[in-house]
Amino acid sequence: MSQITKRKWPTFSALMLVLVLAAYLPVLAQQQAADTASSNSGRVVLATAAAAASAYKSDAAAAQAAFSRAWTVFDSPRCRNCHPSGDAPLQGDDGHVHIQDVKRGSDGKGVYGMKCSTCHQAANLPGANMPPGNPKWSLPPANMKMVIQGETAGQFCRQLKDPAKNGHRTLAQIIEHVSSDDLVGWGWNPGDGRTLPPLSRPEFVAAMKIWVDNGAACPQ
């Protein structure tokens, strides 16, 4: 190799290295940018999933709290007395068994000569602790007892949501029922000598709507 060639070779080698680096650096930069974008995207997905999980937990907690509030009405004598665990209605604020030995019957309106309508008229009779009344006075029918007596808030909530036990009502129909049914409304007009539920009817309905709007999760 001549002296001239020896002097040019390092210069040529250096030039080639510069050209290779110049060609490769943009590719390297693009790859790094893609890796960064992918990492950021992954973090966004994880953050979104975490936020969704947090929101779900928050909604479930709100629903459970709302139903627990509504439960104070369900578990009051005005509701519980007509939703017994057995086939005899209950009476009074203490929830004693109906003293006339009345039975539910298949349709919830009594049996034989002991029909509910024998004593319970279309409206409350005047006077303290006189027979209360409503045109639809009855217990739930035998095939859909909807028991409150002896249940916890969670047990009753799950029962209330079960189409096989609630008359095949949707959640929207449950809200409609508690909002506008005349017999449900009697609970806030029970006649003299009977205590009212702990919430007003609008407060009760509002709690039920919050329960439904937040996913209808049941207390444990």
Image (spheres, rainbow, N blue to C red):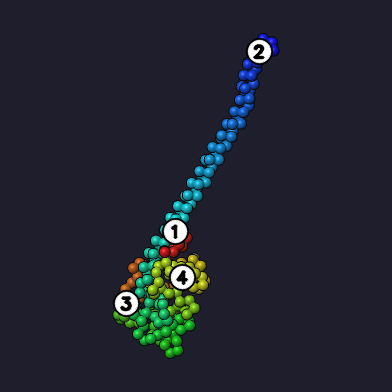
N-terminal of the two: label 4 or label 3?
A: 3
From where the camera sits, is residue 39 visible?
Answer: yes
Looking at the rendered structure, which numbered label has been put on residue 6? 2
Position in image of residue 8 (x %, y %): 65, 13
Position in image of residue 12 (x %, y %): 65, 17
- Name the residue at the front extreme: 1
Crowding at dot 2, Cα within 10 Å, few <14 / some 14-19 / many 20+, comes out as: few
Quadrant of the rendered image containing residue 153: bottom left
**131 lies left or right of 13:** left
Viewer-side label of 2, 4: 2
Relative to residue 6, is residue 160 depicted above or below? Answer: below
Amino acid type indicated by mark 4:
Gln
Amino acid type indicated by mark 1:
Ala
Q: Residue at x 31, y 80 (%)?
A: 129
N-terminal of the two: label 2 or label 4?
A: 2
Relative to residue 123, is residue 52 depicted above or below? Answer: above
N-terminal of the two: label 1 or label 3?
A: 1
Q: Residues at badges 2 and 4 in contact (C-beta under 8 Å)?
A: no
Relative to residue 139, is residue 2 depicted above or below? Answer: above
Q: Secondary structure at mark 1?
A: helix
Crowding at dot 3, Cα within 10 Å, few <14 / some 14-19 / many 20+, comes out as: few
Quadrant (top left, top right, bottom left, bottom right) of the N terminus: top right
- Mark 1 — residue? 60
Q: Secondary structure at mark 3?
A: loop
Amino acid type indicated by mark 2:
Lys
N-terminal of the two: label 1 or label 2?
A: 2
Amino acid type indicated by mark 3:
Asp
Q: CA distance from mark 3 to mark 2?
A: 113 Å
Q: Residue at x 63, y 16 (%)?
A: 10
